[in-house]
Image: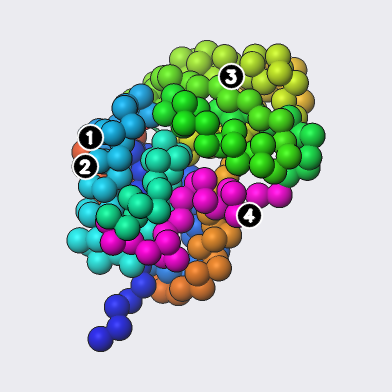
Amino acid sequence: MVQEPVIGIFDSGVGGFTVYKKIKEVTSANCIYYGDCLNAPYGNKEESEIRELIKEDILFLEEKGVTHFVNACNSMSVLTTDALLKESHISTDRYTDMIRAFDKHAVCTPDEIILVIATTATIRSGVYQDVLMKKGVNAFGYAYTDLAVAIENNRTREELLAIVEGGMVYAKEVGATSIIYGCTHYPLIHGLFLEAKEKLGWTGEFIDPAIYVAEEVRQWGITGEHGFCPYSSKDTPAFIKNVIKFV
Ligand code: DGL
C-alpha cells in the first residue's frame, strides 16, 4: 500500500505557525504540526541539547505517520546536518528547513546590507551570515535573548515593543537595508516591528524566510485535503491562541 503523503511541521513552540500559514497558501497537502512548548525556548540552549530535541521532534512526527518534514525553527535548522537526518532515517528530498530553503531560493542583490535578527543559538552558529555572504551580501547578526520566550509567554505589547526596539536600533546603526526574521516567532508580532520601524525612523524592509520554505514545499508537488492537526507537548495559552488563529 502506498503511504499517503503528510507534511509534519515542527518548532519549539508557536513560531512554526507562521511557516504553516505560508505553506497552506501553496499546497492542499495534509499537515501535522508539533510545537514543543514544554521545552521552549530552544534558542538559549546548548547545541548538544538542541540536537537531541531535533531527533525527538522528528520521531514524534514519524510516529504520527508523517512522510515529509518541515523544520520550522531556525535554531534547529542551523544544526540539522545531513548526518543528523541520516541518523533519523530522513532523506533530504523529503525534508526542508529555514536555512536550506533560504539558501536555495532567496535571491539577494549584491551589496545589500542585511541584518539577521534571531535567537542566540542561530546567531552564534553564524550559518545565516555565511549563506548571505556567499550570496554577496553584507551580513550582520543581532541576537534577541528573550523575544521568543516573551512571545511564547504572551507578554504585553508594551513589553514586547521594548524588546523589539533593541534590534531596530542596531539595524539603523549598521545601515541595514533589510531585516531577516531569523526566528519564526517574530512574524507573529510583525505589527510591533512596523511600529518600532516607524518610531525609530528605519527605512528598510522585512524578509520572512517562510516564503522560501513554502516555495520548496510547492515544488514537492504533493496534494491532500487541506487537513491540519496540531499537537503540542504542553497546551499553553499561546499555543491554544495560535491554533484558533491559524486553523
Ligand atoms: N522559533 C524558533 C526559531 O525560529 C526559536 C524560538 C526558541 O528560542 O525556541 O529559532
Q: Nearer the viewer, mark 2 or mark 3?
A: 3
Q: Which residues are magenta?
A: 88-107
Residue ID for mark 2: 233
Q: Amino acid at mark 2?
A: Ser
Q: Are marks 2 and 1 in contact (CB under 8 Å)?
A: yes
Residue ID for mark 1: 38
Q: Are marks 2 and 3 in contact (CB under 8 Å)?
A: no
Residue positioned 66% across, 42% down in the render: 134
Looking at the image, is mark 2 or mark 3 earlier in the sequence? Answer: 3
Please give left or right for residue 3 compared with residue 128 in the image: left
Which quadrant contains ligand 1? top left
Residue ID for mark 3: 167
Residue 180 place in picture, x, y as percent? 61, 35
Looking at the image, is mark 4 or mark 1 earlier in the sequence? Answer: 1
Q: Are marks 4 and 3 in contact (CB under 8 Å)?
A: no
Number of other residues with Cα within 10 Å of mark 2, as a class: few under 14, some 14 to 19, many 20 or more? some
Q: Secondary structure at mark 4?
A: helix
Asked whether residue 58 appears in the rendered view, the answer is yes
Residue 120 place in picture, x, y as percent? 44, 24
**Residue 105's disc number:** 4
